[in-house]
């Protein structure tokens, strides 16, 4: 067995030699005083990229999201978002723990909901009801399989929020995947949102880091919360340099990850017993169903792991997730698909026989 083919997540990337060399050459200063030139440059580049007034470098996209929730809400408020969004299922209960808010999960389609769903979920202004204060959108959707929100749906949801006095947050952890795949610039996706999270440690290939972007006043308040949450760092340019490198070298190439994901989906669709619609694969996330092959998700995960391929599945589900990224090659995709076929073939005797 060769090296592990890690399709578990696009967080699996290791910093390249060139990225590390660039990082070690970056000028440094005390970022808590706003004096780290590399952090400052990254913040400027990201706000220029997103068309916002300002941006703030943070240790993680989770912290960016949690700061956004904190700054747009008061305890007891209601946040409207997709029921399967990262804020709901993958941030350790942070919105309740840190901000004391209630999450109202909408049943979106592949993580995408409508302005009408938002309008229906907004509580009336009545002391009996929680105050609806924030709508949060994920671009691309994670549990939704890397789906891209159409521009008009983004606009309509923002308008529905603002029209009723709510703020709008974009969890654009994979925003650059959406930009590259859709052909709409990142700034277009972000238009109208009061805050935006951009993750550097997913497809962009950095070992660490994220940014929160928004207006000067939003980012000024976010800087205070960064300190409160313990995320204010000192000579952070040593890691922020990775972000500068990634913005220059790792954005356009996301198209390769998307092509690899589509190839994987097409190859998997040819395996009897594997459920997948390759047309649904828009970016770098591939969900496939193994139920018809007589397997559970975790069984497929374990069997593939034995063959040197890592994918992910939740307990009690037959859905399996594979994510492409810059450390996954074309050959890896062919090998991974072949391994899935082998696992399905080996499971065949377990299928009920037709008499
Ligand atoms: C990974 C992810 C995050 C959190 O990113 P970290 O930098 O690992 O904290 C937030 N939102 C979405 C949609 C993600 O996929």
Image (tube, grey):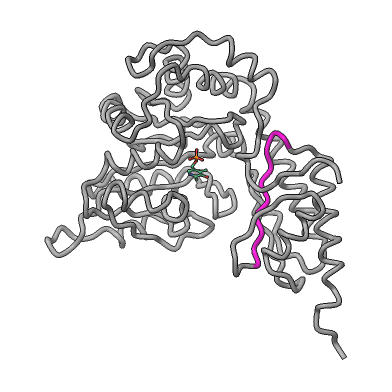
Residue 326 higher or lower than 298, as above or below: above
As rendered, which of 12 and 177 lies closer to the eye? 12
Is residue 78 highlighted in magenta? no
Q: In this view, does 315 lie to the left or right of 112?
A: right
The image position of residue 281, as x and y in percent, is 66, 50
Residue 346 higher or lower than 286, as above or below: below
The image position of residue 64, as x and y in percent, is 40, 36
Quarter of the figure with residue 345: bottom right
As rendered, which of 301 and 252 lies closer to the eye? 301
Residue 155 higher or lower than 120, as above or below: above
Residue 326 higher or lower than 245, as above or below: below
Residue at 38 percent across and 26 percent down: it is 56
As rendered, which of 184 and 84 lies closer to the eye? 84
Which contiguous range is marked in magenta? Answer: 318-327
**In the rendered view of the protein, which quadrant contains the C terminus?**
bottom right
The image position of residue 261, as x and y in percent, is 71, 46
Residue at 15 percent across and 58 percent down: it is 125
């Amino acid at each position: 067995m060769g090296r592990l083919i890690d399709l578990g997540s696009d967080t699996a990337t290791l910093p390249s030699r060139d990225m590390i060399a660039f990082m070690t050459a970056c000028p440094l200063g005390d970022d808590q005083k706003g004096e780290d030139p590399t952090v400052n440059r990254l913040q400027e580049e990201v706000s220029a990229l997103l068309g916002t007034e300002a941006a703030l470098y943070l240790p993680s996209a989770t912290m960016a999201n949690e700061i956004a929730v904190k700054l747009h809400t008061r305890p007891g408020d209601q946040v409207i978002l997709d029921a399967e969004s990262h804020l709901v299922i993958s941030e350790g209960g942070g919105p309740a723990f840190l901000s004391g808010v209630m999450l109202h999960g909408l049943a979106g389609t592949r993580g995408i909901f409508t302005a009408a769903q938002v309008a229906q979920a907004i509580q009336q202004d009545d002391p009996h009801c929680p105050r609806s204060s924030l709508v949060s959108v994920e671009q691309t959707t994670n549990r939704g399989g890397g789906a891209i929100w159409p521009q008009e749906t983004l606009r309509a949801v923002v308008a529905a929020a603002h029209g009723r006095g709510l703020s709008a947050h974009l969890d654009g952890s994979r925003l650059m995947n959406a930009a590259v795949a859709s052909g709409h610039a990142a700034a277009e996706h972000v238009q109208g949102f009061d805050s935006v999270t951009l993750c550097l440690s997913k497809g962009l290939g950095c070992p660490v880091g994220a940014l929160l972007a928004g207006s000067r006043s939003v980012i000024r308040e976010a800087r205070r919360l960064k300190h409160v949450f313990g995320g204010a760092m000192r000579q952070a340019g040593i890691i922020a340099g990775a972000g500068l490198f990634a913005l220059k070298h790792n954005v356009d190439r996301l198209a390769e990850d998307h092509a690899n994901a589509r190839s994987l989906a097409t190859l998997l669709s040819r395996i009897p017993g594997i459920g997948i619609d390759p047309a649904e694969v828009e970016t770098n996330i591939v969900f496939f169903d193994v139920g018809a092959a007589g397997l559970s998700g975790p069984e497929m995960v374990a069997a593939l792991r034995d063959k040197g391929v890592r994918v992910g599945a939740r307990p009690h589900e037959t859905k399996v997730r594979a994510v492409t990224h810059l450390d996954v090659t074309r050959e890896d995709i062919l090998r991974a698909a072949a391994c899935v076929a082998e696992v399905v073939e080996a499971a065949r005797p377990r299928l009920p026989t037709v008499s």
